[in-house]
Image (tube, grey):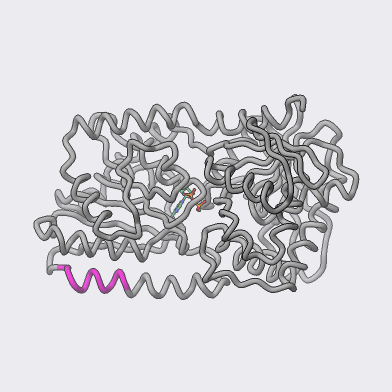
């Protein structure tokens, strides 16, 4: 068996993975624990000078981490990755903050990471690079002589050409992607957008099976929707409902129905739209007041990017506004928390929630949607309300699909979910579970690595 080498911006060291939120970490931890191998990336620490990589071994996995300087971090991570590529890939041109200095830092750090990784590679390794921070990695590894198979998976959406072309260096980004042997996306929409850009702007050729010839390279491309381990989540949720934390939450409801939202605090998640839609629901269906509670958990991330601080303030104000308008002496309509919970606690919360609101404005996949479904009690499953702009909507079409830009539609979906007969809830849930089993985390890993390792 070939050794698996995972390259991602941030490495979650042993014991750290469970606490860190993010779909990438969840998927990568699972892949490495399955097959062993090497995980290479940033340590999450800053250093004044460059130092050699730190190596840690645990449970068949080698963790190789490097520190970044403050200038690298500001330009590569906070700058180009999170203030330019992230908003661009999520269709938020209004939030793109691009500078040439940040782009130079992005290339410099990718080159530095490739220089550090190359000596750790063995000839037969399969190298799997993750996400938008590291698009130039294959080009940089080739520059220092790496001949291994190298694949790339984009966890975020890939934007359509009209949006992509706002990035001054988008042709370089396309060229960098074409230096891989395999490029994978979450949905057919992302893959199609990539093909379209290759054909229309790079003069490349794309065949029906996803083979691409562009920039003098041949590569393959495909759709590999990231999944979860539904059986493990179901077990965890069944145990978690008996835990003190979940019981406390359950008792606090006093018979009211719980509507849950769990997200990183990010503008792509549509939290402001969600709070406004919930207010619209309380307005349109006054009979539901005092019978429901929205629990919105939003863990703060990337707080060094100014837009995230501003969003946090706006959300706090909005939550207060909804509460102020509708709360009664013995009922608070909205419970808004910025802290992080363990996967175990979340699974318990999901299981006792009648409805999940997963309404991002754009999302590569959204694993919370899948985790919510997997955590349900088969006898009495809750209802998933899902945005059509989450990658998950391409698979979970048995959810109630509601457009987050239409508060009335989300309010209607909430009412429908709360009144849905048990037979319909079970049928929709069974359909979604079938998809979760078919496209689980193992299928994701095996299908991507299967194509990457197969003869060209
Ligand atoms: P993203 O990768 O954009 O954060 P996903 O929904 O794909 O979005 O993945 C989020 C992952 O992080 C899920 O596994 C989810 O359970 C976890 N997560 C999200 N918010 C929290 C939170 N507040 N506490 C703990 N885990 C969280």
Residue 398 location, x and y as percent? 33, 36
Residue 106 in magenta stretch: no
Q: In this view of the protein, which residue sits in the foreground, 159 or 413?
A: 159
Q: Residue at x 26, y 51 (%)?
A: 259
Q: Residue 324 placed where, x, y %?
A: 21, 73
Residue 423 image position (x, y, % from top left): 19, 30
Question: For residue 288, what is the image quadrant?
Answer: bottom left
Q: Nearer the viewer, residue 24 or 240?
A: 24
* Quadrant assignment, res 271: bottom left
Judging depth in this view, the residue of 18 and 183 nearest the camera is 183
Is 41 above or below relative to 27? below
Residue at 73%, 72% (x, y): give it: 100
Q: Which residues are magenta?
A: 318-327
Dividing the picture into quadrants, the one containing residue 213 is: top right
What residue is at 51 percent from the left and 52 percent from the top?
21
The residue positioned farthest toward the left in the image shown = 287
The answer to which of 175 and 369 lies nearer the viewer is 175
Q: Dominant secondary structure of the magenta stretch? A: helix
Query: In the rendered image, which quarter contains the N terminus?
Result: top right
Quick check: 383 left or right of 186?
left
| Residue 67 vertical position relative to residue 203 in the rendered view, above or below | below
The relative height of residue 427 versus residue 115 in the rendered view (above or below) is above
Count up the numbered dots.
0
Q: Residue at x 39, y 53 (%)?
A: 262
User: Where does residue 144 sit, x and y in percent of width and height?
Assistant: 89, 49
Q: Point out the image quarter for the C terminus.
A: top right
């Amino acid at each position: 068996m070939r050794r698996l080498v995972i390259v991602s911006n941030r490495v979650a060291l042993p014991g750290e993975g469970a606490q860190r939120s993010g779909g990438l970490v969840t998927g990568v931890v699972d892949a490495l624990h399955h097959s062993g191998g090497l995980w290479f990336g940033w340590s999450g620490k800053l250093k004044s000078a460059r130092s050699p990589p730190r190596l840690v071994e645990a449970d068949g996995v080698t963790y190789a981490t490097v520190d970044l300087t403050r200038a690298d971090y500001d330009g590569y991570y906070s700058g180009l990755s999170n203030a330019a590529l992230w908003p661009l890939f999520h269709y938020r041109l209004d939030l793109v903050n691009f500078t040439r200095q940040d782009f130079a830092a992005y290339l410099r750090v990718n080159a530095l990471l490739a220089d550090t990784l190359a000596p750790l590679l063995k000839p037969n390794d399969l190298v799997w690079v993750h996400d938008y921070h590291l698009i130039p990695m294959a080009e940089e590894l080739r520059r220092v002589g790496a001949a291994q198979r190298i694949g790339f998976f984009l966890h975020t959406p890939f934007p359509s050409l009209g949006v992509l072309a706002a990035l001054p260096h988008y042709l370089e980004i396309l060229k960098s992607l074409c230096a891989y042997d395999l490029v994978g996306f979450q949905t057919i929409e992302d893959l199609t957008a990539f093909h379209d850009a290759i054909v229309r702007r790079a003069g490349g050729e794309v065949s029906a099976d996803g083979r691409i010839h562009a920039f003098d390279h041949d590569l393959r491309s495909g759709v590999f929707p990231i999944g979860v381990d539904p059986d493990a989540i179901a077990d965890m949720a069944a145990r978690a409902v008996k835990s003190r934390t979940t019981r406390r939450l359950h008792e606090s409801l006093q018979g009211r129905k719980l509507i849950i939202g769990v997200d990183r605090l990010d503008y792509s998640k549509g939290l402001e739209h969600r709070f406004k839609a919930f207010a619209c629901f309380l307005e349109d269906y006054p009979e539901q007041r005092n019978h429901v509670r929205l629990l919105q958990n939003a863990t703060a991330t990337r707080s060094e990017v100014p837009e995230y601080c501003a969003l946090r303030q706006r959300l706090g104000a909005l939550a207060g506004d909804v509460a102020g308008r509708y709360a009664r002496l013995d009922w608070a309509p909205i419970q808004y928390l910025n802290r992080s919970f363990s996967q175990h606690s979340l699974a318990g919360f999901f299981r006792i929630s009648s409805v999940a609101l997963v309404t991002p404005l754009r999302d590569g996949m959204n694993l919370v949607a899948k985790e919510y479904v997997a955590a349900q009690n088969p006898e009495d499953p809750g209802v998933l309300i899902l945005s059509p702009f989450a990658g998950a909507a391409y698979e979970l079409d048995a959810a109630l699909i509601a457009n987050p830009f239409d508060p009335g539609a989300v309010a209607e979906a909430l009412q429908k979910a709360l009144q849905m007969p048990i037979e319909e809830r079970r049928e929709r849930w069974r359909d979604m579970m079938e998809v979760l089993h078919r496209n689980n985390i193992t299928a994701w890993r095996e299908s991507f690595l299967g194509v990457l390792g197969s003869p060209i």
